[in-house]
Image: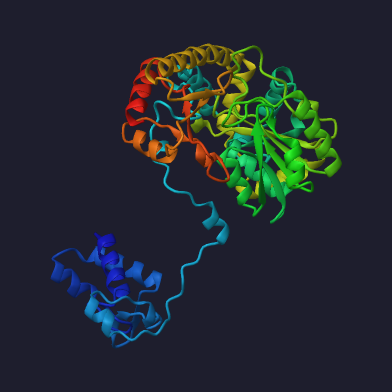
Amino acid sequence: MYDQLSEWFRRAIMDGRLRPGQRVPSTRSLANELNISRIPVLSAYEQLYAEGYLETFVGAGTCVAHSIPGEVLKPTNATQRAAQPKTVQSVPRRISQRVAALRTAPQTWADNQGAFRVGLPAIDHFPATAWSKLINRHARRPPINHMVYGNPMGHMPLREAIAEYLGTVRAVRCDASQILITTGSQQGLQICAHALLEAKDRVWMEDPGYPGARQALRTVGADIVPVPVDEEGLNVDVGIRLSKNARAIYISPSHQFPLGVTMSAARRMQLLSWAARAGAWIIEDDYDSEYRFGGRPLASLQGMDAEDRVIYVGTFSKVMFPALRVGYIVVPKDLVPAFATVRDAFDTFSPTLYQAALTDFITEGQFARHIRRMRALYLERRTALLEAIDRYMDDKLEIIGTHAGMQLTALLPRGIDDVALSIKTAKLGISTRPLSICYAKPPKRGGVILGYSGASVAEIRDGVRKLRSCL
């Protein structure tokens, strides 16, 4: 009751119904008028005194504080507002130009979680029971060092487990001191941008490429240079012609997003050689390389780098679940202090509970088993998607990028607006990400990116039928 009273007085003062210096009822008379106890009225007045809305004068009783500026008060109706003289000129509500550049049109296709949401793993097949036991193990009686401020670089046991895993599976050359834990790969890209780049620095980026990387680079005001991608990956010769003095390169060589091509060995060596000569940094985004269906995952670009020019970014969002929000960066040893400083400035450190549970998930072998199961499941779902497209689409789609990952790209017939198509499919409950938003400029031919990892075979078939109806 005292909250209601104090809130009413605040509103009345700010709306101009009670003016500075105007007397208010005594606590006794207000309590009698409202037919309530005097106690909530006293409590409300005490709160308003403490906040500076009311003050008491000898012989005058309780009044609205004179110190409240009259120009900040807002009249309650249009007549009063029109009659009030304009004492303060309206100031534009400005935001930074950098934030304005980050704004994108509403992406309605991202609201759906079934077919064909890109980047969504098979949540229904995640070993939630085993994971919850690990969470309970560390949450039941957490040690003190799990409850205090942590190292900006992350939980050391997890960093050791990641370093061992990357060395074995991805041929990454590193030790635990080089692992920096992030809240997903998106933060990893932002940390790279802030640690390595100045405003107006030129950065090569695959075209088409990952829109999230473009956003991360724009947060520091980088000048993005779109470099075309062909069947061998990013075209290094074109990049050198466009900007031979670029400061950095963003690349996804093992499974290029969104076209799905793998960067050839010749292009990798050419890129590493040029980066060493130019003093450029290479940001390698290895977002879903665990899922390769024609053999073992390919070795990383970082493992080929003899000059420590590659910063390797990875995530657990695609192999476990997105809400985990745990990713990592492999940082060259001489850059570790700079990256740790940026990480500390962002949000100090990642939550320790999930890091501790994830450490056990990896070291006890459950992570490797989960990846093996998902690799077989995604192969089944990819096959179902290709068969459904072949059955229902009548050659309307041209499929590319089918040998790895969690999604494939389908080129549309010429003349079809892929953004309009994605908006239309979203109304039917399916998510088809338009290919054109991955390009720096509108492409000659649109397409859709179809994620298959997070949808069942039945949902995939139904989704293809709905896509055909929209086409």
> Front-most of 282 and 46?
282
- Residue 10 drawn above or below residue 415: below
Give how far across and how far down residue 449 sits, in percent. 49, 30
Q: Position of residue 297 (x, y in %)?
A: 66, 17
Is 454 or 365 nearer to us in this picture?
Answer: 454
All told, the count of numbered labels is: 0
* Residue 400 x %, y %: 55, 24
Q: Is residue 36 left or right of residue 253?
A: left
Q: Which quadrant, please, contains the C terminus?
A: top left
Question: In percent of the image, x 32 and y 79: which residue is there?
Answer: 64
Q: Quadrant of residue 145?
A: top right
Residue 175 showing in the rendered view? no
* Res. 208 in view: yes
Identity of the residue furthest to the bottom in this view: 59
User: Which quadrant of the rendered structure holds the N terminus?
Assistant: bottom left
Determine whether, in the image, residue 214 is placed left or right of residue 329.
Answer: left
**Could you say where residue 275 lies in the image, as x and y percent from the top left?**
80, 39
| Above or below, 309 relative to 164 | below
Which quarter of the picture shows residue 336?
A: top right
The one nearer the camera, 62 or 163, is: 163
Q: Residue furthest front?
A: 414
- 434 to the left or right of 170: left
Q: Which colour assignment does the render follow?
A: rainbow
Whether residue 89 sits left or right of residue 316 in the image: it is left
State the image quarter where residue 312 is shown.
Answer: top right
Residue at the spot 71% in from the left edge and 50% down from the top edge: 202
**Residue 339 higher or lower than 254, as above or below:** below
